[in-house]
Image (cartoon, grey):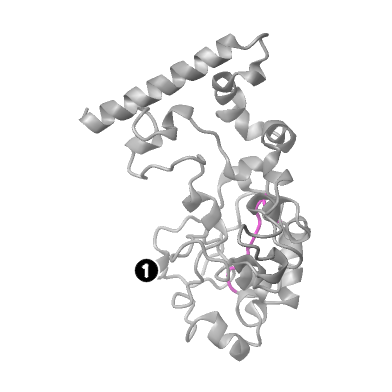
């Protein structure tokens, strides 16, 4: 180990020892007063977390829904007089909201989403909150290290919020520049016939999304391009559709053909022969 790694390891040991001393000095044996025992709750690990209910998670983490953005910044700027990036699409209305509330309890979230805590949070090893502290942690594999929240945004946020790959879709340019040329509809000209299996996962309300998308293309673009978290698009499963071209384009090579098993709401899709 390098000198820096020894220092980090020493600091971590001191933190654990100090926490243990504080807990030992506290009266009673209430496990909720013991941060170490709380961190190692079975609900933080598989398989328990995969069956955990939101109520079980929010019993300790209720602040993610109770806390709201400031009504005014420390400098005095009123939130009501400013518009956040997520308020730009027509699909969002109302006051500014926190990240978790936007995905769980706001009217639009209730309309088109069915997200749960464990949709994104699949557990974590508390030892991996500092890189390299666990021999089996994610810091040791080729996917890199994900710090603090124990959520890999590439496999959670990016499920919806990637860049719209307009070049792969053979569009003449970004949707914002050419939407009117296509009747401002993603469905009428293309997706009623192409990639017809969409949103068939447990964390989305497919019928509500499709109905809203027919009324306003920003329902589609609002997630798939309008609120991008990455400069890349997400490799959505390429479910087969009638008249699907025999040759797979280079950009789609290696794409999965089914959604993740834990999110499927229907049996494996029918395979169409071109």
What residue appears at the point 49 percent right and 68 percent down from the top-left corner?
Answer: 163
The N terminus appears in which quarter of the rendering? top left
Could you say which is closer to the camera, residue 136 or residue 199? 136
Could you say which is closer to the camera, residue 73 or residue 31? 73
Which range is magenta? 194-204
Horizontal arrangement in the rendering, residue 267 relative to residue 15 (left or right): right
Which secondary structure class fits the magenta region best? loop
In terms of image quadrants, where is residue 210?
Answer: bottom right
What residue appears at the point 36 percent right and 37 percent down from the top-left corner?
Answer: 139
Give residue 244's position: percent from left, percent from top.
Answer: 53, 71
Could you say which is closer to the camera, residue 236 or residue 143? 143
Residue ranking furthest to the front: 75
Q: Which residue is mark 1?
A: 250
In terms of image quadrants, where is residue 127?
Answer: top left
Q: Is residue 78 above or below residue 114?
A: below
User: Callout 1: helix, strand or loop?
Assistant: helix
Give residue 3's position: percent from left, percent from top.
Answer: 21, 29
Horizontal arrangement in the rendering, residue 118 relative to residue 20 (left or right): right
- In magenta segment, residue 214: no
Give residue 48's position: percent from left, percent from top.
Answer: 62, 27
Residue ranking furthest to the bottom: 181
Give residue 227's position: percent from left, percent from top.
Answer: 57, 66
In terms of image quadrants, where is residue 119?
Answer: top right
- In magenta segment, residue 198: yes
Q: Is residue 98 visible?
A: yes
Residue ranking furthest to the left: 2
Could you say which is closer to the camera, residue 207 or residue 41? 41
């Amino acid at each position: 180990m390098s000198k820096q790694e020894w220092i980090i390891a020493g600091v971590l040991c001191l933190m654990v020892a100090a926490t243990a001393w504080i807990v030992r000095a506290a009266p009673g044996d209430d496990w909720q007063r013991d941060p170490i025992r709380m961190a190692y709750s079975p609900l933080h690990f598989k398989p328990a977390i995969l069956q955990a209910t939101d109520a079980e998670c929010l019993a300790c983490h209720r602040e993610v829904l109770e806390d709201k953005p400031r009504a005014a910044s420390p400098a005095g700027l009123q939130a009501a007089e400013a518009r956040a990036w997520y308020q730009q699409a027509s699909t969002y209305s109302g006051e500014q909201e926190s990240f978790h509330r936007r995905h769980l309890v706001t009217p639009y979230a209730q309309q088109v989403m069915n997200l749960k805590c464990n949709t994104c949070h699949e557990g974590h090893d508390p030892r991996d909150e500092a890189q390299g502290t666990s021999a089996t942690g994610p810091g040791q594999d080729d996917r890199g290290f994900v710090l603090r929240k124990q959520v890999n945004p590439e496999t959670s946020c990016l499920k919806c919020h990637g860049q719209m790959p307009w070049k792969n879709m053979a569009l003449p340019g970004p949707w914002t520049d050419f939407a009117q040329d296509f009747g401002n509809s993603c469905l009428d000209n293309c997706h009623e016939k192409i990639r017809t299996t969409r949103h068939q996962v447990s964390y989305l309300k497919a019928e509500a999304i499709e109905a809203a998308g027919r009324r306003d293309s920003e329902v589609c673009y609002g997630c798939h391009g309008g609120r991008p978290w990455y400069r890349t698009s997400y490799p959505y499963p390429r479910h087969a559709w009638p008249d699907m071209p025999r040759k797979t384009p280079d950009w789609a090579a290696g794409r999965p053909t089914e959604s993740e098993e834990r999110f499927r709401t229907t049996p494996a899709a029918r395979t169409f022969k071109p």
